């Protein structure tokens, strides 16, 4: 018998999915806010350090002052708003898609390749799979197993519409 409060999820499954959503949301929001409060933060060094298949695109982005300024604002505010949406369970479908796209850009900019050595040290040695890809895949799982309509502001919005 399914519990109408958990929408077919087991209680431990629902708690785990919500905890994962909130944790990823916290990570995104904290990263965004920390960048917003740094007066001189820019993605320039990250983009110029790009290697791999799309390095040229990211180098051109960093070299164009207007594109870089737009990229910086999208990063800071995107991370903050995606994180806030995931934490509160608001517009979670859009937030998960936006988060996946943002993480895809990060992964494409600095893929974990065998011969790649990046300016900023990583926390370990990676080959193909790194924490960015893992977080991206976790968001994909959350997209397939949504929880915002059960525990989150999406539940209230669903009742209004």
Image (tube, helix red, strand yellow):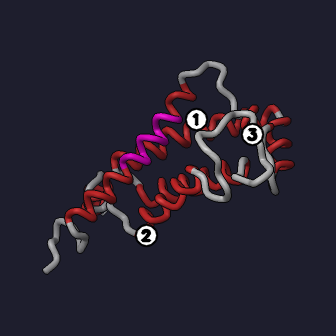
Q: Is residue 42 above or below residue 18?
A: above
Q: Secondary structure at mark 2?
A: helix
Q: Which mark is residue 144?
A: 2
Residue bearing mark 1: 76
In front: label 3 or label 1: 3
Q: The C terminus lies in which quarter of the figure?
A: bottom left
- Say whether disc 3 or disc 1 marks the residue closer to the N-terminus: 1
The picture places residue 114, in percent across and down from the top left corner, at 76, 54
Judge left or right: residue 121 versus residue 151.
Answer: right
Residue at coordinates 80% horizontally, 37% vertically from top-left?
48
The Cα–Cα distance between marks 3 and 1, rounded to whole angstroms, is: 22 Å
Q: Quadrant of residue 124?
A: top right
Q: From the viewer's side, name the closer residue of 10 and 113.
A: 113
List the single residue furthest toward the top.
Answer: 39
List the single residue furthest toward the bottom.
Answer: 1
Residue bearing mark 3: 118
**Circle 3: is it few (<14), some (14-19), or many (20+) Cα within 10 Å?**
some
Q: Is residue 118 above or below residue 2?
A: above
**Circle 2: is it few (<14), some (14-19), or many (20+) Cα within 10 Å?**
few
Residue at coordinates 15% horizontally, 72% vertically from top-left?
3
The Cα–Cα distance between marks 3 and 2, rounded to whole angstroms, is: 33 Å
Task: Please give the range of residues in magenta.
Answer: 22-31
């Amino acid at each position: 018998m399914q519990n109408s409060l958990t929408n077919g999820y087991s209680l431990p499954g629902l708690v785990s999915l919500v905890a994962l959503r909130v944790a990823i949301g916290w990570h995104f929001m904290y990263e965004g806010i920390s960048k917003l409060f740094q007066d001189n933060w820019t993605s320039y060094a990250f983009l110029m350090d790009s290697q791999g298949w799309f390095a040229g695109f990211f180098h051109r982005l960093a070299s164009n002052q207007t594109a870089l300024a737009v990229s910086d604002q999208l990063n800071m505010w995107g991370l903050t708003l995606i994180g806030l949406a995931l934490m509160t369970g608001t517009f979670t479908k859009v937030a998960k898609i936006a988060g996946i796209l943002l993480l895809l850009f990060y992964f494409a900019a600095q893929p974990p390749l065998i011969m790649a050595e990046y300016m900023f040290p990583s926390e370990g040695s990676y080959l193909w799979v790194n924490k960015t890809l893992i977080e991206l895949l976790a968001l994909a799982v959350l997209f397939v197993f949504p929880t915002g309509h059960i525990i989150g502001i999406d539940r209230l919005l669903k009742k209004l519409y």
